[in-house]
Image (tube, rainbow, N blue to C red):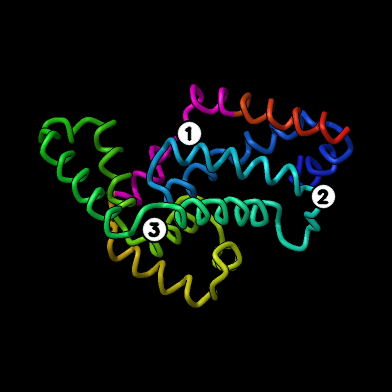
Amino acid sequence: MRDEEIVIAILSGEIDSFEDIMKRYNEQFYRIAIAFLKDPSETEDVMQSAYLKIYEHLHQFKGESGFGTWAVRILINECKMVLRKKRSALDYLHEIASNLKRKMNTESSESKLINKELGLYIEKSILELPAKYRSIFMLREINGYSTKETAEMLSISEANVKVRLHRAKEQVRRRIMNANKQGVLFDFHLDRCQPFRKRVMELIWQKARIKS
């Protein structure tokens, strides 16, 4: 079923169909949000907030761009709102540097050969990209959005998307690309996905009852 058909079903009163939207977009949303926020807990909070806003404004979706583009734009706006409320950029950078140093001191050379640890290292490599490159890399290379869609989501020109993507690739090791093809990056595992969907759907039903 196409996104637009699911939207029509939800607007017609089939509220449970909103869970199909979450099943379809949870992976993408997680990857995009963590590129901005770098914190799994904050990422889930922002995903929840974005889904609720998507539901509340679903009637405003006109189909002028794809549903995914429209929905991701809402998610990105939520991420930016959180970032604006964060502490000063200097304190944030100091914390990042401290965390990375601590992780490097505790990781043994042997553990880096284990697949799980390798995945964490690769994810960390992406998250170390400057923010403007990190978001482009996530949208284009990991989530597979087109240059045009990415430009619309970030409100920048297509030329700017291409330049930033080129620079991002220069800073990321080739093994990250190979790991991504194997599907090991930024998984939103089932044990997290199902409880998350259940929590959001409970909130969606609360809003639906209020409207009725």
Badge 3 or badge 2: first in the primary sequence? 2
**Residue 151 at what x, y percent from top left?**
56, 68
Judging by the rendered image, the residue that carries numbered circle 1 is: 188
Determine the residue positioned at 22% across, 53% down. Answer: 94
Q: CA distance from mark 3 to mark 2?
A: 32 Å
Q: Is residue 139 magenta?
A: no
What amino acid is found at the position of numbered circle 1 in the picture? Phe
Residue identified by numbered label 3:
134
The three-letter amino acid code for the residue at tag 2 is His
Give the CA separation, mark 1 to mark 3. 19 Å
Q: Is residue 120 above or below residue 133?
A: above
Proximity of marks 1 and 3: CB atoms separated by less than 8 Å: no
Residue shown at 13% from the left, 34% from the top? 106
Mark nearer the viewer, 3 or 2: 2
Residue 149's x, y, as percent? 60, 63
Quadrant location of residue 172?
bottom left
Q: Is residue 86 left or right of residue 149?
A: left
Q: Name the amino acid type tagged 3.
A: Arg
Q: Residue at x 49, y 51 (%)?
A: 82
Give the magenta-colored segment's residue range.
176-196
